[in-house]
Image (spheres, rainbow, N blue to C red):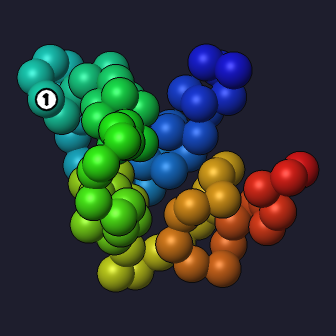
Amino acid sequence: MKALLLAACLLALAEPVAAQPCPLDGGNAPLALHKSWIMEGWERNEGDPTFVFAEKMSRYYDVKAPRGVFYDNFAPGPTQLFDNAAV
């Protein structure tokens, strides 16, 4: 499961990472981004406001110009690998 999540994260970030230098430490390092994507991005507690993908996940996804293949059912755009959450 962790490998699948890591692969999804790497694929989602592959184009921007290839286009710019990758920080080795700090909040924008791959490990820190992966941790915040899972632990903060998808975190939802009882009583939280409605989850709005574009607001909460815009740090991890290019919601204005979605390109690529995403391995989750929530990514913006028509190029998701799966179109059924039950699969």
Q: Position of residue 63 (x, y in %)?
A: 37, 73
Return the residue nearer the eye: 58 or 56: 56
Judge left or right: residue 55 versus residue 69.
Answer: left
Q: Residue furthest right?
A: 87
| Residue 78 position by quadrant | bottom right
Q: Position of residue 9 (x, y in %)?
A: 50, 39
Q: Which residue is located at x 50 percent, y 38 percent?
A: 10
The residue drawn where x is 21% and y is 40% is 21
**On the image, which quarter does residue 5 sit in?**
top right
Instruction: In the rendered view, tell whether residue 28 sits above or below residue 81.
Output: above
From the image, tell me which residue sits under label 1.
27
Horizontal side, residue 82 vs residue 33: left or right: right
| Residue drawn at 37 percent across, 61 percent down | 51
Which residue is drawn at the image coordinates 56% and 45% (left, top)?
11
Question: Is 14 situated left or right of 68 in this image?
Answer: left
Q: Give the residue furthest to the left.
A: 26
Residue 33, given in percent of the width and then of the height, sits at 29, 32
Q: In this orientation, does residue 69 appear?
A: yes
The vertical placement of 11 against 50, above or below, is above
How many C-alpha atoms fall within 10 Å of the one at disc 1: few (<14), some, or many (≥20)? few
Looking at the picture, does residue 82 appear above or below residue 26? below
Return the x and y of residue 40 as percentages of the image width and height. 29, 35
Instruction: Check the picture and name the quadrant holding the N terminus.
Output: top right
Q: Amino acid at mark 1?
A: Gly
Asked which quadrant contains residue 70, the reply is: bottom right
Residue 37 in sight from this viewpoint: no
- Closer to the camera in the image, 72 or 30: 72
Mark 1 element type: loop
How many numbered marks does the figure carry?
Answer: 1
Given residues 4 and 19, the one toward you in this image is: 4
Q: Considering only vertical position in the picture, is 6 above or below 66?
A: above
